[in-house]
C-alpha cells in the first residue's frame, strides 16, 4: 500500500458515526466554544501519539505491530495485553457498525430485517479483506473519500451560510456569524468540567488514527510513506473535525444540537441542499462500513502478529498466496458476529462487559504506544545509537511521550468521575490484570520465543 492508502485507512477508522451523529451531543455538553476547544485538545493528543507511533512504525514495520512495539520496548506481557485489548476493541465495534448500518438501510428498505443487512455487510467486508491488502487499501480509500467529501461540503457551504451566503436555500437566512458562541450562560454554559468531560469523549472520537501502525508491514517504503501518512493524517483530522464542529456550533443553537439525529442533516437543510436526509443516510452508512472495513483488517493483522510471536495458535499465522491471514480474518469476523448477537440477547451482561473493555482499550493502547516509544528511544541512545541516523524520529524527546502519557492517564482517571463511562474501569482494569496473569502462567516471564524475528517476518 502507498501513503495515500495509509492516510485513508486512518481516516476511515476515525471518521465514523461519532462525528456524523454524536457531534451535536458534544456541542450540547460543552457549549459551542467548549466543543471546539475539546476537539483542539483531542487533535493535539493525536499529534503526540502519532509522533511516537511514527518512530516505532519505521523501526518495526511489521503487520499488526502495536504489541510488537510494547513487547520489544517494555516487556512481552505488555505486548500481549495490548494486542488482545486492541483486538477486542475492534471486534466489538464490528457488531455495532453492522447493526447501525442495517438500521439506517431501513429508511429505504423498511421491509428487510436488520439482521439480513448485517449478514450482507459482513460478507462484503470479509470478501474485500480476503482478496488482498491492495484491494482492501483501494476500497478503503474510496470509502473514506466519500466521508471526507461530505465533511468538506459541510465546512464550505456552512462557512458561507455563517456569513449569510446561501444560494441553494429558498429562505436565504441572514448571517449568524458566531453569535451562538455567546450563550445566555456565557462562553462555557456547562463550566470547565463540561469541556474536560467532552475532551475525554473526544479522545475516543479520534481512535482509529493508530491504524497506520497496523498497516505498516504491508506498506511500500515504510521509512518514507509512514511519516508522510502520519503528518497528513493529523493535519486532515484537525481541519475536518475542528472545521465541521465550528460550523455546526455556529449554525445550530447549542441547546438543540444534542436533540437532533444528525447535525449534518440539519446544517445541509439549513443551507438548502436538496435530499439532505437521503444524502447523509448514504454517507453515514458508508462511514460505518468504512470503519468496519478498517476494524476487520486490524483484527486479522493483530491475531496474525500474535501467532508469529508464539502468543496465539499457529494457525492464525497461515497466509494465502496473496499474503492474507485468512484464518485470523475468519475468526475475527466470527467473533464480531457473536458480539453482534450478544448485543441483542445479553445487552446488560455480556455486551456491556465487551463494550466497557473496548472503550477502555482505546486510551490504554495509546498509552502503550507512547510508553514503548519512550523506552525504545532510551534503549537506542544508551546502546550508542545516533538519533540523526533514524529514518524518522519524534521531536522534543522525552517531552512528547511523557506529556502524551500524562494526558492519557488523566483521561483514564477522569472516567471514574463520569457515571456514564465508569464501567470501562470496572471491567477494563480487571481484563488487563487477567491478561498479565495469564501470560505469566502460560508463557512465563520472558514469553514464548517467536519463530521469526521482525526483520525476517513474512509481511
Image (spheres, helix red, strand yellow):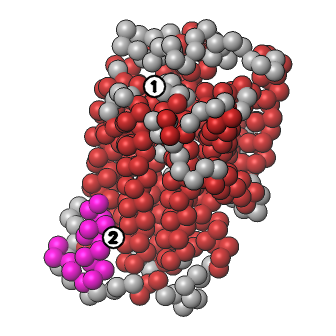
The N terminus lies in quadrant? top left
Q: Give above or below for 272 relative to 117.
A: below
Q: CA distance from mark 2 to mark 1?
A: 41 Å
At 32% from the left edge and 59% from the top edge, which residue is drawn? 151
Relative height, residue 122 to residue 37 (above, below): above
Q: What is the x, y in percent for residue 239?
A: 38, 61
**Residue 171 in the figure: left or right of residue 353:** left
Residue 444 visible in the shown view:
yes
Q: Is residue 158 left or right of residue 218?
A: left
Residue 160 lies in the magenta stretch: yes
Q: Main secondary structure of the magenta part?
A: helix
Q: Label 2, secondary structure: give it.
A: helix
**Camera-side residue: 110 or 105?**
105
- Left or right placement of residue 73 versus residue 105 in this view: right
Q: Nearer the viewer, residue 231 or 367?
A: 231
Q: Are marks 2 and 1 in contact (CB under 8 Å)?
A: no
Residue at the bottom extreme? 184
Q: Which residues are magenta?
A: 152-168
Q: Which residue is mark 2?
A: 267
Q: Quadrant of residue 21?
A: bottom left
x and y, in percent, of residue 312 in the image: 65, 16
Question: Measuring 16% from the left and 76% from the top, which residue is drawn there?
Answer: 167
- Judge whether residue 200 is colored magenta: no
Label 1 Cα crowd, 10 Å radius (few <14 / some 14-19 / many 20+)? many
What residue do we see at 38% from left, 66% from top?
243
In the rendered image, which residue does mark 1 sit on? 217
Camera-side residue: 177 or 458?
A: 458
List x then y, in percent, for residue 374.
66, 42
> 10 Å neighbourhood of mark 2: few (<14), some, or many (≥20)?
many
Q: Name the element at disc 1.
A: helix
Q: Quadrant of the C terminus?
A: top left
Sequence-first tag of 2 and 1: 1
Amino acid at each position: 500500500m502507498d501513503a495515500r492508502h495509509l492516510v485513508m485507512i486512518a481516516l476511515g477508522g476515525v471518521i465514523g458515526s461519532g462525528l456524523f451523529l454524536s457531534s451535536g451531543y458534544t456541542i450540547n455538553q460543552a457549549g459551542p466554544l467548549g466543543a471546539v476547544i475539546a476537539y483542539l485538545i483531542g487533535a493535539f493528543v493525536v499529534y503526540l501519539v502519532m509522533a511516537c507511533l511514527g518512530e516505532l512504525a519505521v523501526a518495526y514495520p511489521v503487520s499488526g505491530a502495536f504489541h510488537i512495539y510494547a513487547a520489544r520496548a517494555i516487556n512481552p506481557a505488555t505486548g500481549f495485553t495490548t494486542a488482545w485489548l486492541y483486538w477486542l476493541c475492534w471486534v466489538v465495534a464490528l457488531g455495532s457498525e453492522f447493526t447501525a448500518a442495517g438500521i439506517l438501510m431501513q429508511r429505504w428498505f423498511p421491509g428487510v430485517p436488520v439482521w439480513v443487512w448485517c449478514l450482507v455487510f459482513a460478507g462484503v467486508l470479509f470478501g474485500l479483506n480476503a482478496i488482498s491488502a491492495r484491494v482492501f487499501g483501494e476500497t478503503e480509500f474510496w470509502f473514506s473519500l466519500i466521508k471526507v467529501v461530505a465533511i468538506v461540503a459541510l465546512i464550505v457551504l456552512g462557512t458561507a451560510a455563517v456569513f449569510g451566503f446561501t444560494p441553494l436555500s429558498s429562505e436565504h437566512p441572514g448571517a449568524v456569524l458566531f453569535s451562538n458562541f455567546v450563550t445566555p450562560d456565557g462562553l462555557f454554559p456547562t463550566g470547565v468540567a463540561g469541556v474536560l468531560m467532552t475532551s475525554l469523549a473526544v479522545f475516543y472520537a479520534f481512535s482509529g488514527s493508530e491504524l497506520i501502525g497496523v498497516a505498516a508491514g504491508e506498506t511500500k517504503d515504510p521509512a518514507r510513506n509512514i511519516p508522510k501518512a502520519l503528518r497528513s493524517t493529523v493535519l486532515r483530522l484537525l481541519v475536518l473535525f475542528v472545521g465541521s464542529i465550528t460550523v455546526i456550533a455556529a449554525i445550530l443553537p447549542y441547546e438543540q444540537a444534542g436533540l437532533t439525529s444528525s447535525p449534518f442533516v440539519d446544517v445541509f437543510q439549513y443551507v438548502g441542499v436538496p435530499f439532505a436526509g437521503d444524502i447523509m443516510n448514504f454517507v453515514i452508512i458508508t462511514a460505518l462500513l468504512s470503519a468496519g472495513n478498517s476494524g476487520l483488517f486490524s483484527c486479522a493483522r493483530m491475531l496474525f502478529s500474535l501467532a508469529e510471536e508464539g502468543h496465539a495458535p499457529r494457525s492464525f499465522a497461515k497466509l494465502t498466496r496473496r499474503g492474507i491471514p485468512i484464518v485470523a480474518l475468519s475468526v475475527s469476523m466470527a467473533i464480531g458476529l457473536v458480539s453482534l448477537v450478544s448485543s441483542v440477547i445479553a445487552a446488560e451482561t455480556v455486551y456491556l462487559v465487551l463494550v466497557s473493555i473496548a472503550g477502555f482499550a482505546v486510551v490504554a493502547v495509546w498509552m502503550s504506544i507512547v510508553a514503548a516509544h519512550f523506552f525504545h528511544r532510551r534503549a537506542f541512545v544508551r546502546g550508542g545509537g545516533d538519533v540523526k541516523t533514524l529514518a524518522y524520529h519524534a521531536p522534543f524527546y522525552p517531552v512528547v511521550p511523557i506529556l502524551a502519557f500524562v494526558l492519557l492517564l488523566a483521561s483514564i482517571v477522569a472516567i471514574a468521575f463520569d457515571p456514564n463511562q465508569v464501567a470501562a474501569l470496572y471491567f477494563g482494569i480487571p481484563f488487563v490484570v487477567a491478561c498479565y496473569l495469564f501470560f505469566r502462567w502460560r508463557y512465563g516471564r520472558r514469553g514464548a520465543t517467536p519463530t521469526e524475528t521482525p526483520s525476517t517476518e513474512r509481511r
